[in-house]
Image: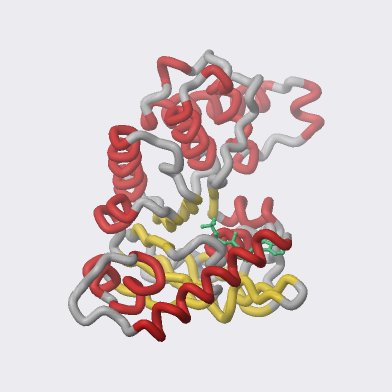
């Protein structure tokens, strides 16, 4: 298991020079990013900008071609289970629940990295195993309460409406008691009411002591919620700053937000951005 020394003011996440190449394509290029324990940080950018690839580097699904990822004071090995155990949990862009398991069981699955009981103890169904199981169930129920899903604990995950399935993914991720939660498009497919509820949930998660890094295309969600926003374009961090700074940045408007503003970039600059997006779209088609 990874050992770590925890200091209160160290960032929970420090990504340094993270680069990910797939053959000739550099999906993420020397990206630095920090997240502190009390922050909600947004990661935005056009389709194909490298946001999910960056998440995959942070969570050990990909071994970055270059760079390091540090959780508090520990450099993380690129292994998902070690990253989870260290304190980083995530949700995915496409819902990944166990459809035929109950809501409670799905959260219990997320608890396993925090359960120390070995196989032998489980097979013998020792008193220690029963105590651990009861504690896990209690924690899972607390999380279902927290996310508003407790009344549906016994329902099959596949029978939940879409917005609740997304909430369940968050509850399951929280079951590993993370210090940092990564959310990949948590409001995709949600109606405005569900989106506002998710906003409140993310704030509550931060208030409970878990920092959040969130990828989202809903700009109202991002700018309402985030203390800081980083913008990726073609794999590179274009701008990072407060919501106000990022919204007003001409390069971000040109490359992503696309809202007309005074002193808009010239045709040449816009053509460059369109070409960049077309290139990213071709790369996607070629996958
Ligand atoms: N496993 C892979 N192999 C090859 N290329 C990949 C792989 N994963 C991603 N890419 C490419 O890397 C680039 C970044 O993709 P990524 O999915 O990270 O973008 P994104 O910003 O998350 O996009 P979206 O907002 O559409 O989810 C794209 O050009 C994509 O085609």
> What residue lies at 66% left-to-right and 66% top-to-bottom?
283
Coloring scheme of the render? Answer: secondary structure
Q: Position of residue 82 (x, y in %)?
A: 67, 55
> What residue lies at 30% left-to-right and 37% top-to-bottom?
192
Q: Position of residue 140 (x, y in %)?
A: 50, 28
Asked if 98 appears above or below 260 in the picture, the reply is above
Q: Position of residue 41 (x, y in %)?
A: 37, 61
- Quadrant where the image shows the N terminus: bottom right
Taking 186 as reference, is 25 left or right? right
Q: Position of residue 199 (x, y in %)?
A: 31, 44
> What residue lies at 79% left-to-right and 33% top-to-bottom?
119
Taking 275 as reference, is 198 left or right? left
The picture quadrant for ligand 1 comes to bottom right
- Outermost residue to the left: 262
- Outermost residue to the front: 267
Q: Nearer the viewer, residue 222 or 273?
A: 273
Q: Nearer the viewer, residue 274 or 44?
A: 274
Q: Quadrant of residue 212?
A: bottom left
- Quadrant where the image shows the C terminus: bottom right
Q: Quadrant of residue 252?
A: bottom left
Q: Nearer the viewer, residue 217 or 38?
A: 217
Asked if 257 appears above or below 120 in the picture, the reply is below
Q: Quadrant of residue 12?
A: bottom left
> What residue lies at 31% left-to-right and 73% top-to-bottom?
241
| Residue 4 in view | no
| Residue 30 in view | yes
**How many labels, in total?**
0
């Amino acid at each position: 298991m990874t050992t770590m020394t925890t200091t209160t003011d160290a960032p929970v996440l420090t990504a340094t020079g993270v680069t990910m190449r797939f053959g000739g394509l550099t999906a993420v290029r020397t990206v630095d990013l920090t997240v502190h324990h009390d922050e909600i940080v947004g990661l935005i950018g056009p389709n194909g900008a490298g946001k999910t690839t960056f998440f995959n580097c942070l969570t050990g699904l990909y071994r970055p071609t270059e760079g390091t990822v540090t959780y508090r004071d520990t450099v993380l090995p690129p292994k998902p289970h070690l990253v989870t155990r260290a304190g980083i949990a995530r949700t995915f862009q496409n819902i990944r629940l166990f459809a035929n398991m109950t809501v409670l069981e799905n959260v219990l699955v997320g608890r396993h990295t925090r359960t120390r009981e070995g196989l032998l103890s489980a097979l013998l169904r020792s008193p220690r195993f029963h105590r651990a199981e009861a504690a896990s169930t209690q924690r899972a129920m607390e999380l279902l309460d927290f996310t508003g899903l407790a009344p549906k604990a016994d329902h099959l995950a596949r029978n939940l409406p879409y917005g609740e399935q997304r909430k369940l993914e968050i509850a399951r991720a929280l079951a590993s008691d993370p210090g940092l939660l990564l959310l990949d498009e948590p409001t995709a497919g949600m109606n405005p009411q569900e989106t506002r509820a998710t906003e409140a949930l993310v704030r509550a998660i931060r208030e409970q002591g878990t920092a959040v890094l969130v990828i989202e295309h809903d700009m109202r969600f991002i700018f309402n919620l985030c203390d800081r926003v980083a913008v990726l374009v073609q794999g590179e961090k274009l701008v990072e700053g407060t919501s106000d700074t990022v919204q007003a940045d001409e390069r971000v408007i040109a490359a992503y937000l696309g809202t007309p503003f005074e002193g808009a970039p010239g045709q040449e600059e816009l053509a460059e951005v369109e070409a960049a997006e077309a290139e990213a779209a071709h790369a996607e088609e070629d996958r």
